[in-house]
Image (tube, helix red, strand yellow):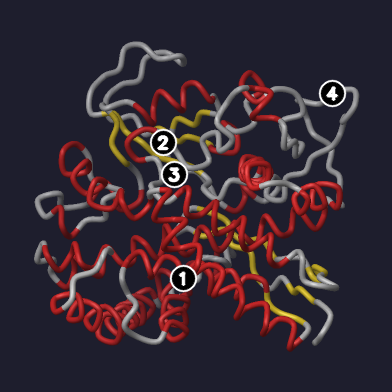
Amino acid sequence: MSTQVIEKGGCPVHAGRDDRKTGDSFKAGLPVFPNSRVSKSFRFAREVLRSPEMRQAASSADSMDYSKPDEISFFFLYGEEHKKRRASVAAHFAPKAIVSRYHPLMQATMDRLIADFQKKGSGVLDEMTLQLASDVTMEIVGLTNTDRQDLTRQIKAIMGSHNSFDKRPLYRFMHDVVFGWFHKAVYASRVMKLYKEHIAPAAEARRANPGNDVMTYMVQNNYSMKGMIVEVMTYAGAGVSTTREFMVMATWQLWDHPDIRERFLAANEEEQFAIIEEILRLDPIAGYLYRKPVSDIPETTEGAVPAGQLLAVDIRGVNSDETVVGECPFQIDPDRAKRQKVAGSWLSFGDGPHRCPGAQVALHETRIFLDRLLRVPGFKLAKPPTVGWSLSTQGYELREAVVTCDKV
């Protein structure tokens, strides 16, 4: 396990220990949007995320046409439209649904993944996590009438269309500016292929036989083709991409910390969740959450905030705020949240009306994935992942990690 020197927040027992995997690459890999007021204060961030005066900001949020809410991801809606859309999906993320509907699917997918892993004796970690995350998310959405593996391949191809992993300036100029038209056309072609081969068949099936999923809701509310595509891609980004990356991160962290890995495997479900959430606190998937107030806010814990000021909540900074998380903020400490009497996820899933609705699904997926994979005889992380940053998801990407095990 590598140890890095921390600038502050050390303590006599753990001086110099830094367990973060993304600490060094974060600022260089994911630059903040221009003219942003950046905050690392937990209390201020919570104020911002919970305030009814705040709106989603930066990237495409500022240019969206809110006159057609059915063609906008509900992550960007606000007010009554946002409440309506949140309510429409709430049942899919309820504890009963997670245990009764998704646990069997998670276990079945892990059965296939582990059987293949043991047959070959090796595997690419992010390919394994992609399959699990895709299976679960597409079950929630209702894309269940076509081949799951082909669906996963198509989602992977769409995600790869942005190619935001390579940040070299000349490469970015050639990719985004000179050949931007070509890459946009490729993206559009892949999305249309997904619609024709997977979304449309699922919609047709739900018209004849309604189910308990997002697709049924879209069909019953007469969503347009664009609306369906936007909703599916929202889930692909929020449900597949982010969870896929974190499962790789959690595997990496537990492999590098044998004591915590053994504790995880011996623990009950509650303690396993505590370990997972502490890893997420340290290396949250999201980089920044952006908000912008629609009116002046005269008083906050960090002073006045004028209308229109772009605010960037630094999730890593917030989750390492010693006034809330306590000593040694860069050390993995599974007992931290219980000791500090704070929810274990801290602000890793956001907060307020736009807090990630699928947080519990992601935690359950990760727990089952780790609990099954780490028990495979001879398991070893033979090659750690390469860390990159995605401009489209505003989070890290972990690729090419190789895991091995005893062949059977």
Per the image, the residue denoted by label 2 is 35
Q: Quadrant of residue 322?
A: top right
Tag 3 and tag 2, C-beta contact below 8 Å: yes
Q: Which mark is residue 134?
A: 1
Label 2 is placed on what type of residue? Asn
Of labels 2 and 1, the one closer to you = 1
x, y percent for residue 256: 82, 54
* Numbered disc in front, either 1 or 4: 1
Which amino acid type is marked by label 4? Cys
For marks 1 and 4, the one nearer the N-term is 4
Where disc 3 sits, the SS reads loop
In terms of depth relative to the viewer, which is nearer, 44 or 94? Answer: 94
Closer to the camera in the image, 57 or 114: 114
Kindly identify the residue that appears in the image at 64 percent across and 47 percent down: 269
Q: CA distance from mark 4 to mark 2?
A: 35 Å
Residue 265 is situated, as x and y percent measured from the top left of the image, at 76, 54
Q: Residues within 10 Å of mark 1 (few under 14, many from 20)?
A: many
Circle number at residue 11 = 4
Q: Residue furthest right?
A: 13
Side of 41 relative to 332 (left or right): left
